[in-house]
Every structure is written in structure tokens, then in C-alpha cells.
């Protein structure tokens, strides 16, 4: 969810230099992947330090988690030797930490591409329109890619590595040979309607960012941090310390060069069964979708503005954009939370149902929201295990005077010490009070566009779910 450097997530939420101190649990679990031998679920491995104890059913939600990050990034993390070359850490994440087979990795990314098309009308494989090019992961230009019109770094080799992409063959799609490539989609190759370019990059969040789960309702969670290091303390930066979040997937950081009119996508997908990029309000107790104020000024469901992007929660009369503009991105992936070497990790799937707006100056999201699904969190009133995550990301800042960054003193930040900051809240079910009173109680607590109408019956049914954790 962060800007990319030419060698992966080197910059992510900031660049710096520091060495993590080991906790009482050390690096149990090894360096190359999970060594878990027991049980799905349960508590975290006992921890020798302080614990975070949280009441069950916090706020009457079934499950509540909170993530924090206040870490130091001193260059990109190197994945274990057997996963090299791996500049964006994605192979380590998928095969080492998620324990997916190559076929499962392929299926997971294919499910992601199907999701982009179904929900947003983004055809990353050019099945219905445009053309797609493949680029080696880690070659994008920060913060939002491109060094000229229509991402010439792909077609003409004008990027930092003078790299020229390879055009995807028609009908090829995701394969075990290209599943770790960056897919770059040109919806309108001639540029008659739009010069938009959409790059989708496979990567894992750099572990030095310190992304950590610090409380989970009904669970004792180790309050693992590094309070006494040489930069004044950070959150957990080691990949195999209990409650560490390993976060990876396929992320579109921003639409580049030009916006995409929704009418252009709709016109080109009108013969398809998928890919109608319309975002709805759920304003009626009967569960029927409503578009809000239509072109005729009414709220009738039959009066649908054909070129408006509506976001749930903004207000039923508010059109936000007339298309997908620049500086918006989308996410698909998994949170993999380490719980000790004798337990399987907690795996939570996330995907975007709303566009995320990026800061054009820093290349990081101002705030983000994704829909969640977790097999371990299936309950009687939430049998699909659905949830929602609301997060915010501060601009990259320094370890001293964190939020204000380089403005905190006249001579700038200390060299080499930049911090990254994330605040993130997860709830299951997604909502308690704004569900619809439908006959099907499975659907009663979700208000996001597209969910739960097309939710999988379980997280384990999502294509590519790791067989190792079934």
C-alpha cells in the first residue's frame, strides 16, 4: 500500500537504518518459511514479556483486531536465499509464509484479476479491451510510475533500468511462469478516450515497517516491541516474533497518466457478464440497491446515472467522481499473522471494494478500506466470516518528531532514520447497525458494494487458498 522503488519496497513508508532487537521468543520459526506443526487457531505462543489482554466481543463485534506500525526501513528486506531473486519479497510471502504451491499462487492471482474485472471493470488480462504488458517485479518508478505519456518505461524502455515490457499474448492470462510479474494494463491503447495506465504489482510489505497486531478481542496478545533500540523504540520488525503481520498480495498503486471514464469501461464491457463498475448505496431495509440521486434528480432505482462513481457512506446524493481518476489504487492479498512455531498463522483475506486515494506527493494512501474474510471468524450470525478494515497511513516521517517529518527542525531529519506509521482497525462482522433486514441473515451485517452477494461461502473456498492450512 505504499510507494515502490526500483528494487521493491525499499522506500515503502520511508527509508532508514536500524537493527531490530530480538524478543524473548527470538526468531523462532526460522528464516525460510513457517515451521508450524500444530493446530489452526487458538492463542499466541506464550510470551515472556507483557501481554495485551482484551475483552471478548468488544463493542459487541464478534472479533476486533488493531494493527500498528512504527518501524524503520533501512533498505529492502532480503528474502531467504532459496527464494532469490525476489526483489519485492512476494515469492517468499506466497511460497514460504503462505505455503502456497505454484499452482495455488497462480490461482490466487487469477482470482484477484477476476475480482478487478467483476468489481471495477479493470481488465488486467485484456480479456475484453485494451492490451496488457508484463514487467519484471521491482522495476516501477516511484511514486506513481511512468516517465512519460502512457508509461513509456513499459513500451519504450525509458524507465530507470531501461526496461521494455513484454506484451501478454491474447488469452494467456495468469500462468506459473508470469505470476510474479507486474501486469501493466492499457485500457485504450490508441488513447482516443483515455491515456490511463494501470500497473498491478505483486509484493510483500517490508517487515521493517513493523506492522504488528497489538490487540485481538478475547485473546491475550504479546505486546511485542523494541522499546530500547538506538532510535527510541519501534514496533515489531522481525518476521518470526509472535503477532507480527506479514502482509502481501497484488496491489494497484494508482491509475497513471489519465483518469478512466466509467462510460468508457461500461461501453466496452456491455457484451460481458462481468465488469460493470458501478458503486451502490444500500439505503433500503429490503436490501434492494439504490443509486441515490439519478440524472433526473430522483432516487428511484430505475434512474441510474451511467457515468458516476458512488461510494457507500459518502451520502446518497453525492457523486464522488465521474470515473476512476488518477491517484487511486486497489488492493488484494492476505494478512498472515505469526502466532508461534507450534500454531498455524492467522490468515485473513482482504480485497478492495472501494478505490483508495493516494497522496500524489508521497505515493502512499491517505486512508484505505478493504473487505475481509476469515475462516476462523465464522460465527452463527456471520457464517461467512466477513469483516472490514479501516486504516490510515501517515506520510513517511522521521524517528524523531515522527508525524512532522523533515519539518520538525531546521536542519532536516537525522540521516538514515525515517519511520513508517500505520493505524489500522479490523471488525468482524463489518457492521453492527447498518445491515439490511434481509430474509437471509448471512447478509444482514454488510453494507459494502459487491458484498456479500458474491462472497465465497468460506475463505477456504477462495481459489488459491493454501492447502497447507485447510
Image: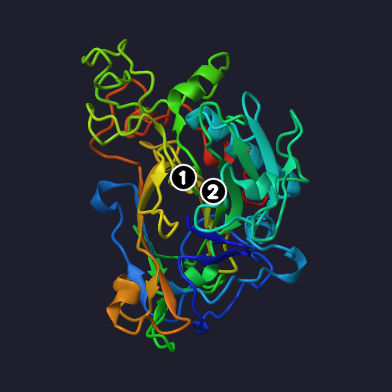
Residue 184, position as x, y percentages in the image: 62, 42
Residues at circles 2 and 1 in contact by the CB criterion of under 8 Å: yes
Q: In this view, does 116 lie above or below 178?
A: above
Which one is nearer the viewer's eye here, 313 or 270? 270
Nearer the N terminus, badge 2 or badge 1? Answer: 2
Q: Residue 251 carries which label?
A: 2
- Describe residue 119's horizontal placement relative to residue 413 as left or right: right
Q: Residue 96's spot in the image, x, y percent?
A: 68, 61
Residue 208, compared with residue 346, is above or below; it is: below
Q: What element does badge 2 sit on?
A: strand
Q: Where is residue 207 in the image (x, y as percent from the top left)?
A: 53, 68
What residue is shown at x 38% (from left), y 49% (from top)? Answer: 368
Farthest residue, direction top: 302
Q: Residue at x 68, y 57 (%)?
A: 91
Q: Which residue sits at x=58%, y=29%?
A: 188
8, above or below 63, in the image: below
36 left or right of 65 in image:
right
Q: Does residue 69 appear in this view?
A: no
Dot 2: few (<14), some (14–19), or many (≥20) neighbours within 10 Å? Answer: many
* Crowd tier of the residue under label 1, counting other residues whose Cα lies within 10 Å: few below 14, some 14–19, many 20 or above: many
Residue at numbered disc 1: 329
Amino acid at each position: 500500500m505504499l510507494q515502490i522503488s526500483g528494487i521493491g519496497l525499499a522506500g515503502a513508508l520511508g527509508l532508514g537504518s536500524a537493527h531490530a532487537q530480538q524478543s524473548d521468543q527470538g526468531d523462532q520459526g526460522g528464516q525460510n518459511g513457517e515451521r508450524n506443526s500444530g493446530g489452526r487457531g487458538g492463542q499466541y505462543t506464550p510470551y515472556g514479556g507483557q501481554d495485551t489482554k482484551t475483552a471478548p466481543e468488544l463493542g459487541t463485534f464478534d472479533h476486533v483486531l488493531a494493527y500498528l506500525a512504527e518501524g524503520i526501513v533501512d533498505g529492502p528486506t532480503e528474502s531467504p536465499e532459496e527464494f532469490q531473486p525476489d526483489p519485492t519479497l512476494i515469492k517468499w510471502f506466497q511460497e514460504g509464509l503462505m505455503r502456497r504451491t505454484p499452482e495455488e499462487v497462480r490461482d490466487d492471482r487469477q482470482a484477484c484479476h477476476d475480482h478487478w474485472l467483476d468489481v471495477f471493470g479493470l481488465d488486467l488480462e485484456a480479456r475484453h479491451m485494451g492490451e496488457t504488458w508484463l514487467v519484471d517485479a521491482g522495476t516501477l518508478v516511484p511514486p506513481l510510475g511512468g516517465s512519460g505519456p502512457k508509461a513509456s518505461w513499459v513500451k519504450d524502455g525509458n524507465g530507470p533500468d531501461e526496461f521494455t515490457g513484454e506484451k501478454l499474448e491474447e488469452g494467456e492470462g495468469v500462468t506459473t511462469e508470469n505470476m510474479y510479474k507486474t501486469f501493466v494494463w492499457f485500457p485504450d491503447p490508441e488513447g482516443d478516450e483515455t491515456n490511463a495506465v494501470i500497473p498491478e504489482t505483486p509484493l510483500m510489505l517490508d517487515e521493517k515497517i513493523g506492522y504488528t497486531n497489538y490487540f485481538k478481542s478475547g485473546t491475550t496478545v504479546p505486546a511485542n516491541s523494541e522499546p530500547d533500540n538506538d532510535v527510541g523504540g519501534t514496533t515489531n520488525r522481525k518476521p518470526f516474533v509472535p503477532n507480527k503481520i506479514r502482509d502481501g498480495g497484488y496491489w494497484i498503486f494508482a491509475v497513471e497518466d489519465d483518469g478512466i471514464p466509467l462510460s468508457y469501461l461500461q461501453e466496452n464491457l456491455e457484451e460481458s457478464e462481468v465488469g460493470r463498475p458501478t458503486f451502490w448505496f444500500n439505503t433500503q431495509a429490503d436490501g434492494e440497491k439504490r443509486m441515490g440521486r439519478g440524472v433526473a434528480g430522483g432516487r428511484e432505482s430505475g434512474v441510474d446515472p451511467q457515468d458516476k462513481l458512488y461510494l457507500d457512506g459518502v451520502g446518497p446524493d453525492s457523486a464522488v467522481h465521474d470515473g476512476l481518476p488518477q491517484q487511486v489504487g486497489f488492493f488484494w492479498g492476505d494478512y498472515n499473522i505469526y502466532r508461534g512455531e507450534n500454531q498455524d498463522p492467522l490468515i485473513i483475506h482482504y480485497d478492495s471494494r472501494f478505490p483508495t486515494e493516494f497522496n500524489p506527493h508521497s505515493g502512499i494512501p491517505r486512508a484505505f478500506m478493504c473487505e475481509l474474510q476469515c475462516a476462523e471468524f465464522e460465527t452463527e450470525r456471520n457464517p461467512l466470516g466477513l469483516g472490514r478494515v479501516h486504516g490510515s497511513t501517515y506520510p513517511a516521517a522521521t524517528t524523531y518528531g515522527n508525524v512532522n517529518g523533515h519539518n520538525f527542525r531546521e536542519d532536516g531529519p537525522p540521516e538514515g532514520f525515517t519511520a513508517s506509521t500505520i493505524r489500522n482497525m479490523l471488525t468482524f462482522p463489518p457492521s453492527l447497525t447498518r445491515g439490511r433486514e434481509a430474509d437471509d441473515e448471512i447478509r444482514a451485517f454488510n453494507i459494502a458494494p459487491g458484498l456479500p452477494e458474491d462472497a465465497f461461502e468460506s475463505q477456504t473456498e477462495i481459489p488459491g487458498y493454501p492447502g497447507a492450512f485447510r
